[in-house]
């Protein structure tokens, strides 16, 4: 097992992804994407996995940040416009399957697992 790991780590085409979890507030959602609020600034083009906890279940989809602007009034929050990425077809736990239920509902927990 160690020989295989050593060989993998010595490979010239080794790729790694760093990530971090960012807590966001879901402000609005549509079939194309969503509006999020965060206390972290995220760069345009950043991608990640958006996870939403709703009615005791977790739903998720890949998203890309299309804009990030500071909220008015110097609150220290940022508004993020994110689009859904079609990296996979909508699955059973896809946010795109429950958009109508999420619109106008209080959502318990939302996180964005961002790839750096």
Image (cartoon, grey):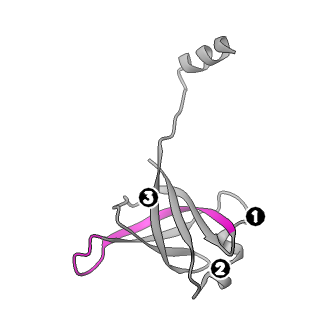
Image location of residue 43, percent across then percent down? 37, 58
Counting residues from the start of the chain, the first of labels 1 and 3 encountered is 3
Q: Position of residue 10 (x, y in %)?
A: 54, 16
Determine whether, in the image, residue 57 is placed left or right of residue 115: right
Q: Residue at x 69, y 77 (%)?
A: 98
Q: Decide: few, some or many residues near mark 3? Use Cα within 10 Å; few <14, some 14-19, many ≥20.
A: few
Q: Main secondary structure of the magenta part?
A: strand
Q: Which residues are magenta?
A: 57-76
Q: Which mark is residue 45?
A: 3
Q: Distance from label 1 to label 3 (Cα)?
A: 24 Å
Res. 66 mark: none
Give me the residue at 62% from left, 81% from top. 102
- The residue lying toward the viewer, choosing from 114 and 13, is 114
Query: Dot 1 surroundings within 10 Å: few (below 14), some, or many (20 or more)?
Result: few
Mark 1, residue position: 91
Find out whether residue 91 is within the magenta segment: no
Residue 95, percent from left and from top = 65, 70
**Outermost bottom residue:** 104
Q: Nearer the viewer, mark 1 or mark 3?
A: 1
- Name the N-terminal-most of marks 3 and 2: 3
Q: Quadrant of the N terminus?
A: top right
The residue indicated by pointer 2 is 99
Q: Who is closer to the viewer here, 14 or 77? A: 77
- The answer to whether the residue labelled 3 contacts the one labelled 2, judged by CB atoms less than 8 Å apart, is no
């Amino acid at each position: 097992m160690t020989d295989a790991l050593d060989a993998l780590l010595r490979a010239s085409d080794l790729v790694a992804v760093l990530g971090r979890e960012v807590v966001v507030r879901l402000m609005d959602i549509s079939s194309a994407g969503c509006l999020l609020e965060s206390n972290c600034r995220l760069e345009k083009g950043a991608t990640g996995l958006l996870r939403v906890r709703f009615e005791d279940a977790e739903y998720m989809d890949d998203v890309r940040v299309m804009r990030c602007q500071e909220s008015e009034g110097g609150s220290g929050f940022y508004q993020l416009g994110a689009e859904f990425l079609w990296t996979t077809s909508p699955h059973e736990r896809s946010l795109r399957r429950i958009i109508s239920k999420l619109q106008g509902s209080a959502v318990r927990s939302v996180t964005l697992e961002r790839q750096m």
